[in-house]
């Protein structure tokens, strides 16, 4: 993603350090580093519904806490820690990396199969940024919609006492009718949002129809942003 765009969004949204206060308060002895470490970087918090690529019916409300890794040869990268909730005792369930569409296009197909698009999550209203004002959230979504994510849940079943089993490769909801309505309703209730209203506002703002991409047929399927076939381009909203 474009660095100016990313940091413009960071500044506009008032992103804050994840644990700067804790770093400053902690005293482990010895010389203290001149910086707060990687966890003191400014971060975003947003919430989405993840699904397992090998089982689209397995879905989770997932909290993302993301900071920027800057200066890479392919542009900046969002590095996200994933949690099952927003409380102090939430479980760390995985990681996700977000890259630009330009960086994604340069990957070989053997790597692309791990990456999912965010177009439907943004336009469909499934991705929200709790705590942001509406205009701030919209500016943030205009950055995220152009990214691809590579996510693994290393705690596959958050109900288990400890992380067990193989990590889950995560995919994104990419069309109407794919979300588990119970999961969505629980998320909306928790954060006091109405996904349908969020969707209407974003479709109007972007001027685009929501994507319609089928769930992956197998683990080697490559993601698409807008359509199942043909040119993978957005459709302008019908007036």
Image (cartoon, helix red, strand yellow):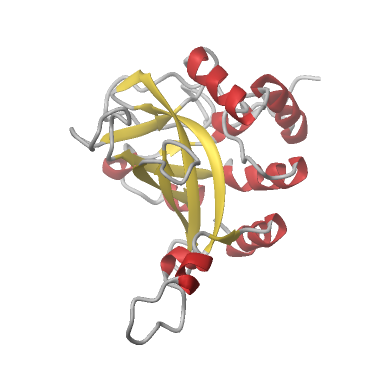
Image spot of residue 134 (x, y percent): 75, 40
Does residue 95 lie above or below 38 as drawn? above
Q: Residue furthest left?
A: 165
Q: Residue at 76%, 34% (x, y): give it.
A: 205
On the question of residue 239 being in view, the answer is yes
Q: Residue at 48%, 39% (x, y): give it.
A: 63
Q: Residue furthest bottom?
A: 31
Q: Residue at 42%, 71% (x, y): give it.
A: 26
Image spot of residue 126 (x, y percent): 57, 28
Q: Where, quadrant-wise, is the N terminus in this rendering?
A: bottom right
Does residue 106 lie above or below 49 as drawn? below
On the question of residue 178 being in view, the answer is no
Q: Residue at 61%, 22% (x, y): give it.
A: 189
Does residue 9 lie above or below 40 as drawn? above
Tally of numbered discs: 0
153 displayed left or right of 141: left
41 displayed left or right of 115: right
Quarter residue 135 falls in? top right
Q: Where, quadrant-wise, is the C terminus in this rendering?
A: top right
Does residue 8 lie above or below 149 as drawn? below
Quarter residue 127 falls in? top right
Viewer-proximal residue among 140 and 154: 154
Image spot of residue 28 (x, y percent): 34, 76
């Amino acid at each position: 993603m474009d660095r100016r765009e990313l940091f413009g969004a960071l500044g506009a949204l008032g992103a804050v350090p994840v644990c700067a206060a804790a770093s400053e308060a902690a005293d482990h002895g010895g010389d203290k580093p001149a910086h707060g470490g990687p966890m003191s970087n400014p971060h975003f918090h947003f919430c989405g519904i993840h699904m397992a690529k090998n089982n689209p019916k397995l879905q989770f409300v997932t909290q993302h806490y993301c900071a920027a890794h800057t200066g890479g040869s392919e542009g900046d990268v969002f590095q996200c820690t994933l949690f099952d909730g927003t409380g102090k005792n939430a479980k760390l369930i995985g990681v996700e990396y977000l890259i630009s569409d330009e960086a994604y296009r340069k990957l070989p197909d053997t790597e692309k199969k791990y990456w999912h698009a965010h177009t439907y999550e943004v336009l469909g209203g499934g991705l929200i940024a709790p705590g942001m004002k509406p205009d701030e959230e919209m500016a943030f979504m205009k950055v995220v919609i152009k990214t691809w994510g590579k996510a693994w849940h290393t705690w596959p079943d958050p109900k288990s006492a400890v992380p067990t089993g193989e990590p889950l490769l995560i995919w994104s909801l990419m069309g109407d009718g794919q979300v588990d309505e119970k999961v969505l309703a629980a998320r909306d209730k928790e954060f006091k949002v109405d996904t349908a209203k969020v969707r209407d506002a974003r479709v109007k703002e972007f001027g685009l129809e929501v994507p319609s991409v089928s769930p992956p047929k197998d683990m080697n399927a490559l993601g698409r942003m807008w359509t199942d076939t043909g040119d993978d381009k957005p459709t302008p909203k019908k007036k």
